[in-house]
Structures are given as structure tokens and as C-alpha cells.
Amino acid sequence: MAKSAKPASKQPPKGRKGAAKKAAAAKPARKTASRKSAGKKGQAPSADDLFHYYRQMLLIRRFEEKAGQLYGMGLIGGFCHLYIGQEAVVVGMMATASSNDSVITSYRDHGHMLACDMDPKGVMAELTGRRGGYSKGKGGSMHMFSREKNFFGGHGIVGGQVPLATGIAWKIRYAEEDTVAIVYMGDAAVNQGSFHESLNMAAVWELPVIYVVENNEYGMGTAFSRVSKTDMSAKPVPHGVPASVVDGQDVLATYAHFRELIAEVRGGGGPRFVDLQTYRFRGHSMSDPVSGTYRPTEEVERRKAEDDPIAVLRDKLLAGGHLDQAGLQEMDDEARQIAQDAADFAEASPVPDPSTLYEHVWAEINEHGRLFFDGRDR
Amino acid sequence: MAVMTYREALNEALREEIQRDPDVFLMGEEVAEYDGAYKVSKGLLEEFGDKRVVDSPISELGFTGLCVGASMAGLRPVVEFMTFNFAFLAIDQVINNATKMYYMSDGQFPMPIVFRGPTGAALQLSAQHSQACETYYSHAPGCKVVTPATPADAKGLLKASIRDNDPVAFMEGELLYNVKGEVPEDDDYVIPLGVADLKNEGSDVSIITHGKMVHVALQAASKLDKDNISADVLDLRTIRPLDMDAILETVKKTNRVVYLEEGWPYAGTGAQIVAMIQEEAFDYLDAPILRVTQADVPMPYAKSLEILAKPSADRVVEACRNVLYR
């Protein structure tokens, strides 16, 4: 997990306002970025911070590309949902979180784990279902966890993780801790009852939880506007949870917004809801085409050209004179190497030992009685 | 020994466990200010405050999921369902999250949590409020299922369930709350999960059952006794873990078995028990095992129809006679 926001240069980052305008202009149909996203306080990311965000986004991008390759080679099975296009969301958000804050998300979870500082090798080895994976091959792409990093998992049922986050926040308040629960979900999750029941309880009990919608406009192949009469930002309003809208393709906008928001929640301000406007550059999962029948190829191509979060930050780094092409290339090579090392590890790691099939079904094997009913444990 | 009701025994267990472990809290509809829909949590709010005894909104999915998340994060929640009939709204959180988390995380997240409340029929509550829900939970690896029949069992098993490190569906009986019985006066009266209890000793036939039906079985045994037929009544007490040793012992003693349960027959608990007995004690059986269950229909409202739908002592007597061929 990224460290807490570091106090850095007193100047606002170069080019931020220009980029925000550009992003807004590129998406006339969408809401403009939150008012809060324009940095108004003195603290802004240092050049080192910017490099860190760039490296993290690149790592996620290269990792996911590699995962896609391994999937194509048959080394990864089942469902595999890539995060490509949405990297700025989790990198910007996690840059504001402390390592003691808790994070939980849905099944499009690889990027979140990398942003929580989990080992890319352990993540990739879980994708290949090997012993070296975070769940030793029992979870797969959608179910990985790290107690050590306070990462409470990828979850496979749309909206199913939202009450869990609310409960993690309940525990934070119960134990009077100074931390925050952060839950990510896709736009489709806000139509689940679990979302509404959670927000209601979080508001009533003023729980320290941030509900982050990664609004990539499509729940699988269904455009959000086709399944919701109201705007995304209206969803939490009936529950008394404040909403904000942020340009999720601009890591600096995301960072600036969350830096304030997380402080409010940590300070006892109760739950918050954020509509992070982003876009998925790949299919819903590896088994789907990139655009499919539900969105035009031109739309995807245009968004990739105009809204690539990595390109947005790269342009700022170049324009700000922080870095030259060679420096960028070096960082990219580094990310590719980490992804390759992860893939090598994931391919070489042995498959799970058959004896582990029955491990960890029960945390407590009672002294009396049978717990298994398939002929074992007679 | 103290004589108390099943309700009071549960209340004592909750009080002692909330007192004993600061991570234990009770959440559910009407558990605090109202003292519990069935008064099981009476006085607990006053004693422990609203941090430990929490009124939830009527959001079964939501508060169940919240408690599952709190368990992941290190607390030991007790979730009260006003009845398990309402828990269908929450079953995604129980099955997909609570029972699988430990496995999916390769042991990183144990899930100590108790889901408790009444299951089964009461009187004329009709289809949506009268169903025995055990099998929905016992079906899933990762979920323990406990069905106490007496006040003593209610107390000892609830304490064991709260102390257990896995999810436990603790299923009470609405019609049992007023049943009185002797309960040991011991703060640490804990009955280990997975130990069946022979509630009546006989030699001619075995009535195996669980939960509220133990009382129906005992009525049947008493009727059979008048005809000089003596019945073992084996109360499983917990369905997972299952005391198979005790089952095999009674089967080998009487060689004739009737399984009695409140739920529906298809894929019911009895179906599982029968399958296991024939796998493991086929040669000891002198007759096919019969089951007495609820009629295979949704519970009707009319008293006359409800009586027909519910398992009764007379039907158990008849089944016992059938397996004895007399």
C-alpha cells in the first residue's frame, strides 16, 4: 500500500489545471471533475510522488498485459478481468491511504492488490493456480487476500463486498481505531440491494468507510444509463451519504480529491461516496471481445487515444520537465521486467499439493463428530 | 441445577459470552430496545449498552454482510434473525462470504460468527413463516449447524457456538422458547459441538432426530412404550459436525431406524443420514429406514391442514411399527 501523502513541493503540480480542462472537454457528455479535485491546498505531490504513481500505473498495465498473454497461452483459467484503462483510480486513491487502512474490492482486483503493495509474483501465481499464489491456488483471479496488507479480497458476487466493507468499518469504530475502510465496486453494483442497505447503515452509524464506484460506464455489456433512471451521483443521496464526482483518468485529480476526503472520513465525518469516472479498455473479462456488441469500436479507440491515464500523466511529466523520453522508457522497462519476473515465477511455481484440497475448510476441527461428508474423516 | 425456560437459557448464554469476550456483540432486528422479538435478548441492552447489543434496520442482507465483514476484521458477531425464514434474504452473505472466506483466503481469514434465531413452524403462521431451514446451511462446507432441543442444550451449545472459530447456524424453535428444563448453574457450561445425546433409551427401534422434533419423538416413544415397544431417541444436537458414532451405535443396537425431521423430505437431513447408514451399517438393518417429515407442500394456514402437514407423534409411531413389522 502506498504511504500516506507525503508533504512535498509547495507548488501545485504543473499542468494539472490544463489537464483537468482537457479531460472535461474530451467528455462533454459527462459531469466535470469534482470541484474538490482542483488542488486548493498547498500540499501537492512531489516529483518523486509523480514518478511513483507513473511506475505503479505502468506496473499494473504491464502486469495485466502479461496476464492476458498467459491467459491466451492457457496458463490462466476461469474468469480473468483486466484492469487496463482504470489504473489511475486505484493508484490515486491508494496514494492517500495509510497502510493500516483496509481495502476490499470486486473481482477486477489485480490492480488493487498491486497498489496495496502485494507481491506481483504472488498475485500472478494465484492467477496460474500455483502454490506460490496468495491463496495457494484456492482463490484464483477473483479471490485473493492479504491479511498483512489489510487487503480483504477480491469478491465474485457483484455488490457482495459492499456490506463486508461496512462491517470492516464497524470494527474500526468498535475498536476505536484511526483507520478507514475503502471499498471499490463497479457501476453495476449500485443497483444491488447490498449497496443500498450498506449505505443506509453506514450513514446511520457514521461509519468510517469510503464507497468508491469505478464507473466504467458498462456493467458487463449493459450501459449504466440503460439500467438506471438517475445519475450515479444521485445513488447515495437518499441515504444521507455525501457524493462527489471525479475524473478517474487523471491520477492527480483522483489523488487530490481523496486526500481531502480520506481526512474527512478519518476525522469522524462518516461515510462518503465517490463516482470515479473511468473507462475499461478491454473486454469485461478475457472471454469477451474488447468492444463487442454493446459499445462501438470507435468509442473504445477514441477513449484509448484521449483518456489513457498513463498517457495523461506521461504528458504532464514531460511538459513539467520532470522527465525525458529516456527516463520514461527506463520506467517502462522496469515495469515490464517485474511483470515478466512475476510470470516466470507463476509458471515455475508448483501446482498445489493434493493434500491441500481439504485444508482450511474449517478453522476449527471439532474434537467430536464429522465435518466432511464425502467419505473422508470417517 | 436451575429450572429455566429455553429462552432464559439462551439469554444466559448470550449474557455470559458477551461478558466474557469483548469482541462478542449481538446485532439484529429488535434485539435491543424491544428486548428481542422473542425476548431472548431481554435486559442485555441495559446491561451492556448499545455498542454490544445493536438494533439493526430491517435489512437482513445488509446487517448479515456487515457482521460477516466485522468477523473478517476480527470481531465475533452474533447475528439474530427474527426467524430463519427472513434469512433467505441474507443467504448470499452466509454461503458465499462467511462459509467460503477461510478457504478462499487459504486460511488468512477465519470467520467466527453465529447466525441464530428460530427455525421451523409455530402455529398457523402459514407458508412464508413456517419452514425448517437446516438443510440450506448444512449443505455448505464451512458452515456448522446446531439445533438444540432443551434449555440445557440451548445454553451449552450456544456458548460453544459463540466460542467456535467457524460460522455456525444456530437454529432454535419458536415453540421451544417456553419449554422449561434443568440447566447446570455453571458459568462455563459448554457442550462441545458434534456430540449427540440419547434422550430416551430403548432397544427395539431407533428414532433419530434433531431440534424441536426431539419432543415429538419423545411423545412417540412414550406411546410406543405403552405397547411394550421401547425406542431409542437419539438427538443429534448438531448436524455439522455430525456424531456418526452415536448414530451407528443405535443402529447396531436396534437394527431398525426412523428419521424424524421438521423439514421437507427431498434432500433433507434425513436423506443424508439414511444414505450414510446404508453405506456404513447396511448389514445391521432389519428393515428399510423410514422418514417422517413435513408433507412435501408449502405450509398451509388452516389448522386442519397444518396438522396434516406437520410431522406428528402418531406418524412416528406408525413408522416405527412399520419398520418393526408390527
Image (cartoon, coloured by chain):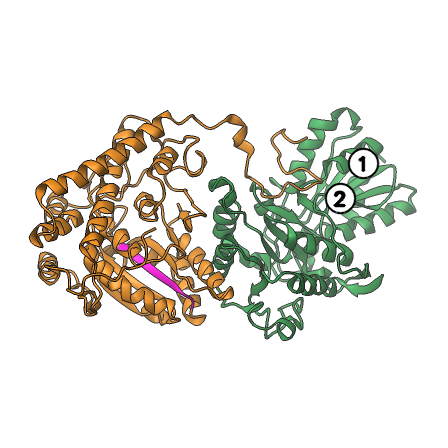
- Under tag 1, what secondary structure? helix
- Under tag 2, what secondary structure? loop
Q: Which residues are magenta?
A: A207-214
Residue B67, given in percent of the width and then of the height, sits at: 51, 58
Quarter of the picture containing the C terminus of chain B is top right
In the picture, one chain is green; tell me its letter: B
Chain A pictured colour = orange
The residue sitting at 8% across, 52% down in the picture is A321
Front residue (pair A25, A375): A25
The disc placed on residue B196 is: 2
Residue matched to label 1: B250
Q: Are marks 2 and 1 in contact (CB under 8 Å)?
A: no
Front residue (pair A18, B318): A18
Of all chains, the one bearing label 1 is B
Callouts 2 and 1 in the same chain:
yes
2 or 1: tag closer to the N-terminus: 2
Left of A162 or right of it: where is A286?
left
Residue B13, given in percent of the width and then of the height, sits at: 70, 61
Mark 1: amino acid:
Thr
Front residue (pair B199, A45): A45
* Tag nearer the camera, 2 or 1: 2
Q: Does residue A319 lie above or below A296 as drawn?
A: below
Q: Name the magenta segment's main secondary structure.
A: strand
Left of A104 or right of it: where is B169?
right
Q: Is residue A231 visible?
A: no
Check if residue A212 falls in the magenta segment. Answer: yes
State which quadrant residue B271 falls in.
top right
The residue sitting at 44% across, 31% down in the picture is A131
Residue B148, given in percent of the width and then of the height, sits at: 72, 53
